[in-house]
């Protein structure tokens, strides 16, 4: 039984307690029980529990997205711009073949499409805190990639900052 399974089981049990007795469950919630987990796992684990208790603000959600984009996801998936560009090339090839006409998606397109996918997921099923965090994260990645691409095509004016 790996750590992911243990965390998933703990989250399910916590969710059931919160639904059955929200006041008692919130009072009994002990984040220190997760203290032996590494920072990334702890961040990914405690934020959804806070969301279930209705205590997450937009600022906290954005910080959580930033922590994931700059931390755990960056280590797992590598450079954001390169990753989005790779996906764009693969999706472009697939769509070009499927539609029998040229399609060219860049990294910004990919990040925006992923954000749209996350927005679409909010329209069905149960509330999922992660959809909103990922939506914010993909929006930020799209902005970063667009700014990087823009900086690469702008002429050097010679002006110093």
Image: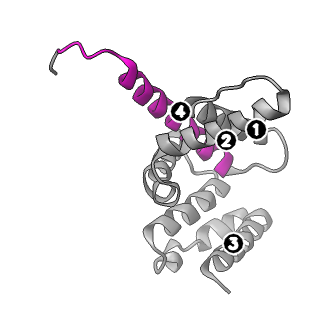
Q: Quadrant of the C terminus?
A: top left
Q: Residue at x 83, y 26 (%)?
A: 100
- Given the current orientation, which residue lies at the most extreme left position? 160
Proximity of marks 4 and 3: CB atoms separated by less than 8 Å: no
Q: Which residue is mark 1?
A: 94
Q: Nearer the viewer, mark 1 or mark 4?
A: 1
Q: Mark 3 or mark 1: which comes first in sequence?
A: 3
Proximity of marks 1 and 2: CB atoms separated by less than 8 Å: yes
Q: Residue at x 59, y 36 (%)?
A: 111
- Given the current orientation, which residue lies at the most extreme bottom position? 1
Q: Secondary structure at mark 4?
A: helix
Q: Is residue 59 visible?
A: no
Q: How was this image coloured?
A: one colour
Question: Where does the image place residue 81, in percent across and percent down from the top left?
Answer: 48, 40
Q: Residue 90 — which label?
A: 2
Question: Where does the image place residue 53, in percent across and percent down from the top left?
Answer: 64, 57
Residue 152 on the magenta segment = yes
Q: Nearer the viewer, mark 4 or mark 2?
A: 2
- Identify the image quadrant of residue 105: top right
Q: Mark 4 or mark 2: which comes first in sequence?
A: 2
Q: Which residue is mark 3?
A: 8
Question: Where does the image place residue 70, in percent across and percent down from the top left?
Answer: 43, 50
Q: Nearer the viewer, mark 3 or mark 2?
A: 2
Q: Mark 3 or mark 2: which comes first in sequence?
A: 3
Span of residues in magenta: 130-158
Q: Secondary structure at mark 1?
A: helix
């Amino acid at each position: 039984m790996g750590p992911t399974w243990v965390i998933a089981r703990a989250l399910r049990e916590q969710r059931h307690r919160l639904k059955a007795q929200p006041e008692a469950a919130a009072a009994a919630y002990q984040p220190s029980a997760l203290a032996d987990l590494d920072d990334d796992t702890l961040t990914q684990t405690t934020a959804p529990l806070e969301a279930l208790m209705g205590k997450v603000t937009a600022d906290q959600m954005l910080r959580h997205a930033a922590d994931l984009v700059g931390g755990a996801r960056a280590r797992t998936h590598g450079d954001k711009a390169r990753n989005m560009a790779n996906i764009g090339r693969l999706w472009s090839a697939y769509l070009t073949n499927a539609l029998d006409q040229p399609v060219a998606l860049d990294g910004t397109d990919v990040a925006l499409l992923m954000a749209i996918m996350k927005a679409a997921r909010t329209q069905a099923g149960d509330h999922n805190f992660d959809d909103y965090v990922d939506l914010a994260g993909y929006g930020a990645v799209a902005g970063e990639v667009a700014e990087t691409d823009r900086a690469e095509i702008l002429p050097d004016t010679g002006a110093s900052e």
